[in-house]
Image (cartoon, grey):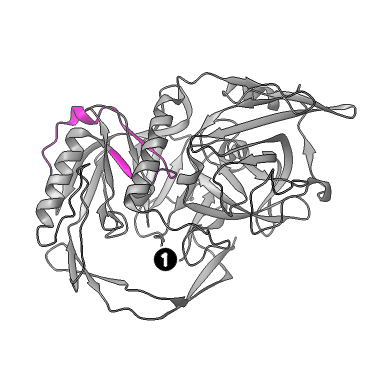
Amino acid sequence: MSSPLFLCILLVVFGSYLSITAAGDGHFRHKMSAPRRLQLGCMYVSVTPLPNRAGAAVPLVHRHGPCAKSQSTDKPSSFADALHRSRVRADYIMSRSRATTMHEQEKGKVSVPAYLGTSVDSQEYVVTLGLGTPAVEQVLLLDTGSDLSWVQCAPCNSSDCYGQKDPLFDPRKSSTYAPIPCGSDVCKTLQSNHLDNGCTMNGTHSQCGFRVEYGDGSKTKGVYSNEALTLAPGVVIQDFHFGCGYKQGGPNDKFDGLLGLGGAPESLPVQTSAVYGGSFSYCLPPVSSGTGFLALGAPSNASGFSFTPMTHFVDDATSYLVKLTGISVDGKQLRIPRKVFEGGLIVDCGNIISHLPSTPYEKLRSAFRAAMTAYPLIPSDDGDTCYNFTGFSNVTVPKVALTFTGGVTVDLDVPNGLLLDGCLAFADSGPDDYVGFLGNVQMRTLEMLYDVKGARLGFRAGAC
């Protein structure tokens, strides 16, 4: 089945740009061109993005990229800002399995749970889906570190809801909307997954309440609900459970809500497992490029993928974990004891920068710096690896590859999978054997296939 994707056509952008060519010595050379005017813009076309795909695929874009439907008013993250956000998010996820459920009672209002979630402000990639009947377009942040999906709902005034470009979803105008009763099994699963549940009476009917509060101070609460979710023309998920938010707060910007892709029952992949088998994949495009995709269901022929075993992190049903076994720079394997990788890596598309335990991080940083001695290193109190490329017409960057359990070696895209704001997009996660994170910079241009039933993660190079 063909699916709508964005086709990006260049319109008005000023500044210098990077052209990439492969060098014969195994490096990639980046030519810094003089400032020029480009043509930028996007439009929908109907294409089939994935071969042998029986499921549904939808366009996925960076919220600061040229094809974002609702342009964010904030700027793309600097390395320092991205590093701060990534550390806050990593700290939370590490503590989530030990988190206790909190309750909040508000007289005369929906009784809802409180839940300390990950930082919404760290999310970078969005998809546009249809909610309700008739379907209303909603731009949703993509997050493998969250389960419960939500949108802002009408009626909601400016003090209760933040500004968004699209109209608020109004359940009163949908023929398929229904609040979930507080005594239902669906509502009870919120409690079993640390989201808890609350009840309110609307006439003679009880409704299930929800509350999500994130590490960056943003929050949403409202009614846990049932609705039709349209992925593509003719591809509709009936009875999709989501949060209809009537009171929001914090540093939110332009997006309409969040789409949870974690492993708990509230997530989109688990809710649709009867149809798509629980598998899903995505390809994250570079910031300056066009579109990637989010797909539900596994391809009928996975011959283009390399797979490594995947589990969940401790007793946290949300997070997906893989194990790194080695790193190479410029084609040379770094000498790192395998025991320091025992903690594994949480695969997290909402975490911008990858985090490695101290020994592998320091080995990687040292080898990368050795290959980049031609360029001035910007001094840093935190030991970051950032460069000043001003005045260089050509920049040569070494290849970096990650090897996972089973001998699966993944070449990171150059430069999009390595550099962020001129900095090596890796950070120190702490002592050896600590859990690390595979961030979205390193995922860029790869198709990441989550085969949950098969307990494996697949990588396909050059997918977007």
Q: Is residue 339 magenta?
A: yes
The structure residue drawn at horizontal position 56% and vertical position 57%, both measured from the top left corner, is 58
Q: Residue furthest right?
A: 204
> From the image, which quarter does the N terminus lie in?
bottom right
> From the image, which quarter does the C terminus lie in?
bottom left
Q: Amino acid at mark 1?
A: Ser
- Counting from the top left corner in percent of width and height, residue 390 is at 21, 68
- Counting from the top left corner in percent of width and height, residue 441 is at 35, 51
Is 297 or 65 nearer to us in this picture? 65
Q: Residue furthest front?
A: 159
Q: Quadrant of residue 458?
A: top left
Q: Which residue is mark 1?
A: 289
Q: Is residue 175 magenta?
A: no
What is the number of callouts on the image? 1
The structure residue drawn at horizontal position 69% and vertical position 39%, both measured from the top left corner, is 247
Is 295 or 99 nearer to us in this picture? 99
Q: Is residue 107 visible?
A: yes
Left-right relation of 121 to 308:
right
- Counting from the top left corner in percent of width and height, residue 334 is at 12, 42
- Counting from the top left corner in percent of width and height, residue 444 is at 37, 54
Local SS, label 1: loop
Q: From the viewer's perspective, is residue 100 above or below residue 27?
A: above
Left-right relation of 79 to 74:
left
Decide: few, some or many residues near mark 1? Use Cα within 10 Å; few <14, some 14-19, many ≥20.
some
Q: Is residue 52 visible?
A: no
Left-right relation of 20 to 122:
left
Is 402 or 122 nearer to us in this picture? 122
Q: Magenta region: which residues? A: 332-355
